[in-house]
Image (cartoon, rainbow, N blue to C red):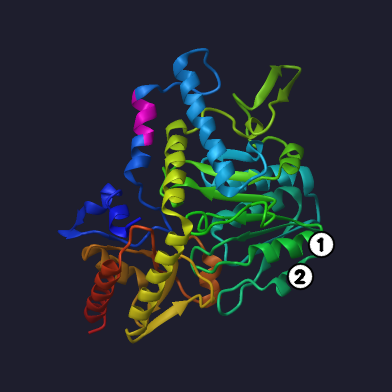
Amino acid sequence: MDLYEIRKQFPVLKQEVYGKQVVYLDSAASSQKNIDVLLAERHVTLDFYGNIHRGAHYMADKTTEVFEGVRDKIRDFIQAGSREEIIFTKGTTESINLVAFSFGEAFIGPGDEIIVSEMEHHSNIVPWQMMAQRRGARVVPWPFTDSGELDPATLRSLITPRTKMVAFCHVSNVLGTVNPVREITALTHDRGVKVLIDGAQAIQHLPFSVQEIDADFYAFSSHKMYGPNGVGILYGKRELLEAMPPYQGGGEMISEVRFSGTTFNELPFKFEAGTPHITGVAGLGAAVDFLKKVGFDQIRAHEQMLIEKTTACLRQIPGIIFYGQAPVKSGVISFNIEGIHPYDAGTLLDKMGIAVRTGHHCADPVMARFGIPGTIRVSFGIYNTPEEIDRFAEALNKVISILRP
């Protein structure tokens, strides 16, 4: 597909900010939505909306058909073994919280350990800390290298007989590092330990199979992959999900309720209490269709071109400090400018119509590792163009001339 034709499918990118056409370089925080995603949500709402799984009428049945059809699309998209292994959540954060709570209740006790990499988003740190405090367990940090990589040899030295879980990201939201997930899961499983992979920054960039990488749990969000917000996915191996207690109680997740006791529903419904974001799930289905139509070969090639062009432009600017020098990266570049606070630079770039992210990116341990308060982060989507990178570089030079005359 032609890049510029793809871009036309994202209506918001036609907008102007402060009199200038917006250059959106913040897709790692949240990607924009194409017209098919918006229309899929609208279609359900306007044409046949009803609550799923519960009605004996056409509108409920039609809505259920759409909703459960998306579950099948996700199963195929990540190549899971069965549809029962696909759990709908509110997002990556809830998916990880679900595992931390339910896996912790089933498998983790006093003195046990959970290894968490130091390049994680807070959503893959805090739930484990909360669970460890509740269960009397301990969170063990897994440091990353100076180049921003996770070293499997370091992990091997951290695993003990008390280790129950290793939690790490597929792609770092700050450094852009693509971690060697298959090598890490193989090493971890050899020691009898389970893994949870945060895939929020990989799902829109990289093709993979959860079975091939042998993930025990894999979490991601719709809004990172050109879909609606408020929808997420947890993949879990069936035998683990079956052994875990429900995360929340309410409608849908039960089989029978009596005051003498309650029996729970079968998978996947055991973990889907209450009415979900039905129209958002419909939009997620359209986002999956979009990614498959474009194809990951084209997505990967285009984003690598953007990374290389942006890096080359930044290298021509004196005083640029890069964070994360891994040989395999995806979608993200983090940097600072000597003598300039990242927030000041981001504020001025915004006035020039350039949207970037500044701050700690919900990754305080990464900032602590480098001894900095934050970075300027540029992140890409399939809709970004080489011309936008030129505009960004020109604007950044203007920012520097203003803040460091």
Q: Residues within 10 Å of mark 1 (few under 14, many from 20)?
A: some
Secondary structure, magenta segment, majority class:
helix
Could you tell me residue 107's position as x and y percent?
78, 47
> Which quarter of the figure has residue 154?
bottom right
Report the front residue among 318 and 280: 280
Could you tell me residue 144's position as x and y percent?
61, 73
Q: Is residue 298 left or right of residue 391?
A: right
Q: Which residue is pictured at 70% across the width and 71% down the height?
A: 152
Which residues make up the magenta segment? 40-46
Could you tell me residue 325's position as x and y percent?
51, 78
Residues at marks 1 and 2, CA–CA distance in whole angstroms: 9 Å
Check the image and name the residue furthest to the front: 1
> Which quarter of the figure has residue 392?
bottom left
Whether residue 148 is situated above or below residue 34 in the rendered picture: below
Is residue 21 visible in the rendered image? The answer is yes
Q: Which residue is mark 2?
A: 156
